[in-house]
Amino acid sequence: MKENFIAYPSPNHDLRKGGQNTIDTLVIHYTGMISAQKALERMVSPSAKVSAHWCIDEDGTIYKIVPENLRAWHAGISWWRGRRDLNDVSIGIEIVNPGHEFGYRPFTPPQMNSLVNLCQEILKRNPIHPLNVVAHSDIAPDRKKDPGELFDWSRLARKGIGIWPNSIKTSPWHRPLKLNDHNSEVKLWQSKLAELGYGLVQDGIYGENTELVVMAFQRHYRQARIDGVIDHGTSNILDHLIEYAKAL
């Protein structure tokens, strides 16, 4: 089924360096503003210099902001799977939600229904690997939290959009790793996060950047506990996802 949408064009875009054929990533955001109208107005304001390709209101209405063949300005400074400037290779979807600053709340069923339909159509049009269906917080963990811990990634995965941990096998126990730890074990888990796609220095030092990356990982894949600590549960999920991704 083709998505139905309302055109709400933004001037905030430019050309993709490699054209349409470079699209291989899908980034999910929340708007983080007090209303849908405020978010839409910002995305079409030339002075704001931000936009997305799509926006989904809480009633399920889909707005088309920038054509997919063009480069929308949604990702900002970003990194995923060895690449910077995700704007050039991605499609961005904004989901209306006030966000953590203005009263974060669950996403509505109509929103999620529209999102699933839209994502399925996008995946038909573009060769996007499941690992490249990401949160804004995944590609910019030092700046962003969206779409956050209330977003239903598991539903998307059940519909063939992205990945989600299932049937997790228990890994060997290790002591929790946290801020200010520094040893070879920290470096091991830094390398595993990098293997999944996150950008961080693998130096064996559990600094603030590592903590933020772990929180981004938890916000996406272990939403019940977002503390920036690599405990047994978080490491089990990470190991599971790495093995699952290898089989894709």
Image (cartoon, rainbow, N blue to C red):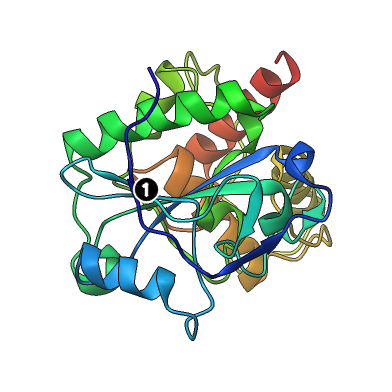
Which residue is drawn at the image coordinates 74% and 51% (left, top)? 190
Q: Which residue is mark 1?
A: 225
Left/right placement of residue 222 relative to residue 56 reads: right
Left/right placement of residue 10 relative to residue 81 reads: left
Query: In this picture, is 232 found above or below 113?
Result: below
The local crowd at label 1, few if under 14, some if 14 to 19, many if 20 or more residues have their Cα within 10 Å, is some
Which residue is drawn at the image coordinates 18% and 41% (left, top)? 108
Which residue is drawn at the image coordinates 52% and 40% (left, top)? 234
Query: In this picture, is 230 found above or below 157?
Result: below
Left/right placement of residue 48 relative to residue 112 reads: right
Q: SS class of the residue under badge 1? A: loop
Q: Quadrant of residue 37?
A: bottom left
Quadrant for the C terminus, please.
top right
Q: Can residue 180 be seen in this snapshot?
A: no
> Residue 216, image x and y in percent?
52, 54
Quadrant for the N terminus, please.
top left
Q: How many labels were placed on the picture?
A: 1
> Residue 189, image x and y in percent?
72, 45
Q: Quadrant of residue 208?
A: bottom right
Query: In this picture, is 15 found above or below 196?
Result: below
Q: Quadrant of residue 134?
A: top right
> Residue 55, image x and y in percent?
36, 51
> Residue 166, image x and y in percent?
47, 17
Nearer to us in this view, 60 or 219: 60
Q: Can residue 145 be seen in this snapshot?
A: yes
Nearer to us in this view, 162 or 45: 45
Tag 1: residue type?
A: Arg
Which residue is drawn at the image coordinates 37% and 75% (left, top)? 42
